[in-house]
């Protein structure tokens, strides 16, 4: 790819990155993690969970802490404020990943541009004689 096309591509990538940055710069309050629904048995032999293998369903928030996965009980129903906060966090993470991808593509393009402009000392001497 020639230098002009590389500059155009880098410029477009930078515009895309700037738009993404505008979207993540003021994220608002978020709760880190993912919501999971899990079934469990209560242990009461007369309960439906033991008699009919129909488990009690509860929601948990799963998140990484100090290299381990931590589950926090939420309840049978997820409050809308929590669901919204978790969705905001997950959306924010996706935008950050897109920014990192754009950064890598910009870096690759800049390296290609540099390589296209590099010349040997012999080539440089010939042009300056």
Image (spheres, rainbow, N blue to C red):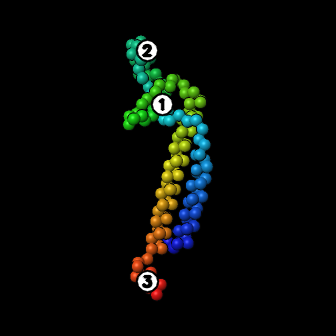
Considering the numbered disc 2 on the image, is that residue within a helix, a strand or a loop?
Answer: loop
Label 1 vs label 3, nearer the camera? 3
Residue 44: mark in rendering:
none
How far apart in space, not on screen, are marks 2 and 3 (Cα)?
89 Å
Mark 1 highlights which residue?
61
Identified at 47% across, 62% down, the residue is 108
Q: Report the number of discs.
A: 3
Q: Residue 76: x and y, percent?
A: 52, 23
User: Between 85 and 26, which is closer to the camera in this rendering?
Assistant: 26
Q: Residue 12: x and y, percent?
A: 58, 62
User: Between 107 and 39, which is closer to the camera in this rendering?
Assistant: 107
Q: Are marks 2 and 3 in contact (CB under 8 Å)?
A: no
Mark 2 highlights which residue?
47
Mark 2 and mark 3 lie on one chain; the one further toward the N terminus is: 2
Q: Residue furthest front?
A: 129
User: Between 92 and 52, which is closer to the camera in this rendering?
Assistant: 92
Q: Residue 88: x and y, percent?
A: 57, 39
Other residues around mark 1 within 10 Å, as few (<14) / some (14–19) / many (≥20): many
Mark 1 and mark 2 lie on one chain; the one further toward the N terminus is: 2
Measured along the vertical axis of the image, is residue 82 above or below residue 56?
A: below
Identified at 47% across, 73% down, the residue is 116
Can residue 52 be seen here? no
Mark 3 highlights which residue?
125
Measured along the vertical axis of the image, is residue 29 above or below residue 116?
A: above
Can residue 80 be seen here? yes
């Amino acid at each position: 790819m020639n230098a002009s096309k590389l500059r155009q591509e880098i410029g477009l990538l930078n515009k895309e990155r700037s738009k993404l940055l505008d979207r993540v710069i003021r994220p608002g309050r978020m709760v880190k993690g993912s919501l999971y629904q899990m079934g469990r048995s209560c242990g009461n032999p007369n309960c439906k969970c033991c008699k009919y293998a129909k488990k009690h369903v509860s929601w948990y928030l799963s998140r990484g802490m100090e290299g381990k996965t931590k589950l926090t009980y939420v309840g049978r129903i997820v409050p809308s404020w929590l669901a919204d906060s978790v969705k905001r966090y997950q959306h924010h993470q996706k935008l950050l990943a897109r920014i990192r991808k754009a950064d890598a593509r910009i870096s690759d393009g800049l390296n290609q541009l540099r390589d296209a402009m590099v010349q040997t000392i012999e080539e440089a001497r010939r042009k300056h004689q």
